[in-house]
Amino acid sequence: MIPFNTPPFVGKELDYMKQAIESKKICGDGEFTKKCHRLLEQQTGCEKVLLTTSCSHALEMAALLTEIKPGDEVIMPSYTFVSTANAFVLRGAVIVFVDIRPDTMNIDETLIEDAITSKTKAIVPVHYAGVGCEMDKITEIAKKHNLLVVEDAAQGVMAYYKDRALGTIGDVGCYSFHETKNYSMGEGGAVLVNNREMHERSEIVREKGTNRSRFLRGQIDKYTWVDVGSSYLPSDMNAAYLYAQLEMAEEINNNRLASWNKYYEAFEELEENGLVQRPFIPDECRHNAHMFYLKVRDIEQRSELIAYLKTKGVAAVFHYIPLHSAQAGLRFGRFHGEDKYTTKESERLLRIPMYYGLTDKEINYVVESVYSFFKR
Ligand SMILES: *Cc1c(COP(=O)(O)O)cnc(C)c1O
């Protein structure tokens, strides 16, 4: 059986976790957390990166930092993971879903402006598959209407839009280090605080609404409750696990890209024959091979292909029932404009095995299995 995903493991994780344990400082913001912060800041160019317990929590922090209030509207695609919406719904926001572009599956930037009302506070682009949204246009709209931008870059670690790291372009960016993502700590994430006015508050919100971070730096002599907040910092043992992978980020990225490129070439013929569509990467984007997907004719053919691959021992999956059509989506949001592509394109898409360390043999087998489905 070729799994759909297997969590990345580079070898040094246990050693670093042992060091964290032996340091007798295993709670949040220990040595390995600091090392991760420094590495991520260097790699992205963001001045303030803070590890969190998940990307869902990074998004919740973003919703607190953007000061979303009940009744405020937040614009995002419907084709995304539930956490993108939940973070803002938890603050009482109304979610306004906008259609996606069929080529990248990202929010259609040309439809955003029409969805803006006097209640709109933020735009939340999601960089699907680690392929950047059209951020120049989104930033321009946000500036014009005085809106904040929160990037859901859960899938976008080590990916770029016009040479800027995804997650560093909006006011706040959110990364995921979940087991299914390119770099992992089991459960975890990071918040990238690009807007300087939010720097101090980001530390407070993450530390239960206290000024403990300033206290630890010796800037004040006791710490106290100063704002609303929660506990969003991971244990240093988890950070130690992640650090091993961040040190190898370039190598993991190149390994994934090599596998992605092999799939891409191998499926060229199927695409030329009009049987599938491969992912599209705009010229402005450098992606990170977070996933490899194929789009087939329709939902029936997708179900058949997934079932067929299963008989061959290949795990393929689909995801994202569009949020606007889900029970909670109907309750907490509305779709602005026409759903031209969100439902239709989401029903055609399936993801095939993609992970660090995928072998050529496995890639060839997956490719052959897909070809044999269409030759039946
Ligand atoms: C994985 C993912 C999340 C949630 O990440 P967690 O770290 O599991 O909370 C949010 N948004 C998108 C687009 C994701 O892919």
Image: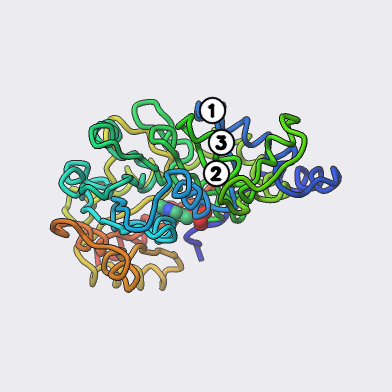
The answer to whether any part of residue 248 appears in the image is yes
Q: Nearer the viewer, residue 204 or 179?
A: 204
Q: Distance from label 3 to label 2 (Cα)? A: 7 Å
**According to the image, label 3 marks what residue?**
49
Task: Give the numbered dot on residue 47.
Answer: 1
Relative side of 217 to 339, left or right: right
What is the x, y in percent for residue 36? 64, 37
Label 2: few (<14), some or many (≥20) within 10 Å? Answer: many
- Seen at 56% across and 30% down, the residue is 41
Disc 2 residue type? Ala
* Kind of residue at badge 3: Val
Q: Which residue occupies 45% across, 32% down? A: 195
Q: In the image, 212: left or right of 73? A: right
Residue beneath disc 2: 190
In the rendered view, tell whether residue 70 sits above or below residue 20.
below
**Helix or strand or loop: what does disc 2 sit on?**
strand
Q: How far apart are labels 1 and 2 at the CA level?
A: 13 Å
Element class at badge 1: loop
Q: Where residue 362 appears, x then y in whole percent?
A: 48, 54
Mark 3: secondary structure: strand
Tag 3 near tag 2, CB within 8 Å = yes
- The CA distance from mark 1 to mark 3 is 7 Å
